Image (cartoon, helix red, strand yellow):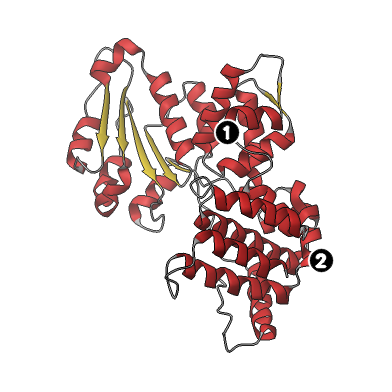
Amino acid sequence: MHFFLSSSNRYSLELITLVLSLYFSFEFKWKIFQVKVNVLKYNEAIQSINNSQYFPVYFLQGENTHYIDEITKLLIDKVLDESERDFNQTIFYGKETTVDQIIDAARRYPVMSSYQLIIVKEAQHLNRVFDKFEGYFKDPVPTTILVFNFKNKKLDKRKAVGKLLSQRKFIIDLDAIKDYQIPEWVLSCAKKHQLKMDQKASILISEFLGNDLSSIDSTLQKLKLLISSNQIVDVDIVQQHVGFSKDFNLFELQNAIAAKNIQKANFIAKHFAHNPKNYPLVLTLGNLYSFFTKLMKYHFYVNQLSNTQLAAKVGVNPYFLKQYEQASRNYSKGKLAKIFGYLRDYDLMSKGVGNSSVKDDEILKEMIFKIMH
């Protein structure tokens, strides 16, 4: 939900605040229409594959493309020996193949192997004709392991083929990790790579790389090669090897704004203005919009939930709740309504709407001033 408001909006801030209050109250009470489906979980899939217990169909779907790639790679590594792959491993691409070609291949039997492995990448491009697989899914060949990579989309489980896949437990929903869960995921990934890491370093990496799990995984593999086995990955190591400035970044700008540290915020903004390639205005705008949206949620939920529930509802790691508590004292709901208007106006200015001469660095400085005064 977007709350971009023009500074000249005819509605009063009181009315805007009331609308926001009603929205968050409604969201808080919205529970009864969640649909439960019979899907295989990520950890269950990994465990069964490692135990050589395979399903005849793996339908990997969702926004977590890293997990889709990870499960697919694990199947490639586990199902067939390297010597068996020439005759028993086939890779299709949804843009370049038909349903009939995939089914014909799936009905073949393996050559001198217990299984054949068929991987359909970019399977989301077959979405409109997926009902043609229904007959095969009802009676799959037990010696074929058919894997679909259905990225950034989900099959409609209300339709016959989606319902069938769900009933057979062939679907694995791989949703994007929530922002507040990323630091914990970084720590678990570091543990997988046998890296020791402190919590602040995991938070810094998550703020720098966001929810790009593949980039995080690659970064941790890089760190594994660069440091000794007994070293603990801390903020200094992240800064040194990941190319991340611990003084000048969006995370520190957000902290300065939350604390109403005007001098520090202006200092960081000046650095951003001198390094527009590394700190584009559109990225700063997006980050601030996300921060203030979470802060508005904090205002509406703080007296209704426990700290753990509050962190989940706001969408942050519990570690950051103190920052939001501080920011809530500095920015009232009325002030936040004004800030959303500023962000909208400066977003339009950065795109050239009503502005033909003001540069991004000037927009950034003026925006920071208005937010903090």
Q: Position of residue 320 (x, y in %)?
A: 75, 50
Q: Position of residue 70 (x, y in %)?
A: 46, 31
**Disc with the residue nearer the chain's start (1 vs 2):** 1
Please name the residue shown 71% across and 74% down the image: 335
Which residue was labeled with disc 1?
243
Residue 299 appears in the rendering: yes
Q: For the residues marked 1 and 2, what is the alpha-carbon distance in whole angstroms?
A: 34 Å
Helix, strand or loop at label 1? It is: loop
* Most foreground residue, 37 or 246: 246
Residue 364: quarter of image:
bottom right
Compared with 168, 298 (above or below) is: below
Q: Residues within 10 Å of mark 1 (few under 14, many from 20)?
A: few
Please name the residue shown 51% across and 41% down the image: 212
Do the CB atoms of the residues marked 1 and 2 lie less than 8 Å apart?
no
Which residue was labeled with disc 2?
329
* Most foreground residue, 369 or 139: 369
The outermost residue toward the bottom is 10
Which three-letter amino acid code belongs to the residue tagged 1?
Answer: Gly
